[in-house]
Image (cartoon, grey):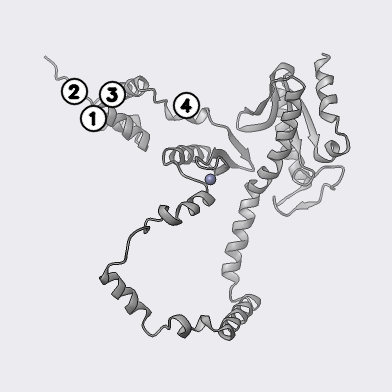
């Protein structure tokens, strides 16, 4: 008679969700990997590789971005990495932790959400704080309560910035900002508004529209299944509209020349056409000039 192992299925599901692989779990519990997978399937837990496939991972200049909604305010949170698998993992970690956007999590720290809310310092910690403040001046004795001192401190700091003593701090801040822009965080906000307008218009014309279509790792803005039509909305600046920019124009934010950006976009265009889709690019300035552009475009494909 063989030994029958009783498995705690809840435990397996939990450990797997926390990030342990089915192989490791199997080894730890002395069963095969397929046994673990069978249990996971029974509880409706999908394989990690499959769950990544179901995500809209946007790839741009080798950065992979997944958009997640803040559970509180429903605003977009961007999860990025230069590795799509890591981006996917971080996405699911963030979902399971119910992570909020920066604004909401700061908001949560106020009042009742503050871990210190309703609590008081113990006498011991009061003494410690008091000791640490000894000789440092409080209230009116605090040097920063004096406007002259404040002004002096301000000028000193400015001097440090100007003569390069703060170069290290400046560089960190500047790099952070550049990185933010490169990842398209700023662009995504500007662009999605226009995209939404276009989608609204197409819906008004009576078509079903999908917000984004994924081919390989590339994400396209708008897809109309009935017309097999993909529409890419290109901001003039972000995509260096050839009507406005020369090929040697250097895009500071993207750290690429216009020509390099066009080449990148061309790869994306070739990929979608190569997969048998119709593609139309709508340029920001063209749409501004002609408000019937989307209508004309749709009619063009509807005739076929
Ligand atoms: Zn939020």
Task: Using the rendered view, name the quadrant where residue 147 is placed.
Answer: bottom right
User: Dot 3 surroundings within 10 Å: few (below 14), some, or many (20 or more)?
Assistant: some
Q: Residue lying furthest left in this view? A: 1
Q: Of helix, strand and loop, which one carries label 2?
A: loop
158 or 141: nearer the viewer: 141
Disc 3 residue: CB within 8 Å of ligand 1: no
Identified at 22% across, 28% down, the residue is 30
Mark 3 touching mark 1, by CB under 8 A?
Answer: no
Who's the residue at 69% across and 20% down the image?
Answer: 208
Question: Which residue in the protein does label 4 denote?
Answer: 50
Disc on the earlier residue, 2 or 3: 2
**Residue under numbered circle 2:** 5
Q: Earlier in the sequence, mark 4 or mark 1?
A: 1
The residue that mark 1 highlights is 29
Q: Position of residue 83 (x, y in %)?
A: 52, 41
* Badge number at residue 32: 3
Mark sitting earlier along the chain (4/3): 3
> Observer-nearest residue: 254 or 74?
74
Against 135, residue 279 (above or below) is above
Identity of the residue drawn at 31% across and 66% down? 121
Q: State how far apart marks 3 and 1 are (Cα).
A: 9 Å
Instruction: Give the spatial CA distance, label 4 vs label 1.
Output: 24 Å
| Labelled pair 1, 2 in contact (Cβ < 8 Å) | yes
Q: CA distance from mark 1 to mark 2?
A: 9 Å
CA gap, disc 2 and disc 3: 12 Å
């Amino acid at each position: 008679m063989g030994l029958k192992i009783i498995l705690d299925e809840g435990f397996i599901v939990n450990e797997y969700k926390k990030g342990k692989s089915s192989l490791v779990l199997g080894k730890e519990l002395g069963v095969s990997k397929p046994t673990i997978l069978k249990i996971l399937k029974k509880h409706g837990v999908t394989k990690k590789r499959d769950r990544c496939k179901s995500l809209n991972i946007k790839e741009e200049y080798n950065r992979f971005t997944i958009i997640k909604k803040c559970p509180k305010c429903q605003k977009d949170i961007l999860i990025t990495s230069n590795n799509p698998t890591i981006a996917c993992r971080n996405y699911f970690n963030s979902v399971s932790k119910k992570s909020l956007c920066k604004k909401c999590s700061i908001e949560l720290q106020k009042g009742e959400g503050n871990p210190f809310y309703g609590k008081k310092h113990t006498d011991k910690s009061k003494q410690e704080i008091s000791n640490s403040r000894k000789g440092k001046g409080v209230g009116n004795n605090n040097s920063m309560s004096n406007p002259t001192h404040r002004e002096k401190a301000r000028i000193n700091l400015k001097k440090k910035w100007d003569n390069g003593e703060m170069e290290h701090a400046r560089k960190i801040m500047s790099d952070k900002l550049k990185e933010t822009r490169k990842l398209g965080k700023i662009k995504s906000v500007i662009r999605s508004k226009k995209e939404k307008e276009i989608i609204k218009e197409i819906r008004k014309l009576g078509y079903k529209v999908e917000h984004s279509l994924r081919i390989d790792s590339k994400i396209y803005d708008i897809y109309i299944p009935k017309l097999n039509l993909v529409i890419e909305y290109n901001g003039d600046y972000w995509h260096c509209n050839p009507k406005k920019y020369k090929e040697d124009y250097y895009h500071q934010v993207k750290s690429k020349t216009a020509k390099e950006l066009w080449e990148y976009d061309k790869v994306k265009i070739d990929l979608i056409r190569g997969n048998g889709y119709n593609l139309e690019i709508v340029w920001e300035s063209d749409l501004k000039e002609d408000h019937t552009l989307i209508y004309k475009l749709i009619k063009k494909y509807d005739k076929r």
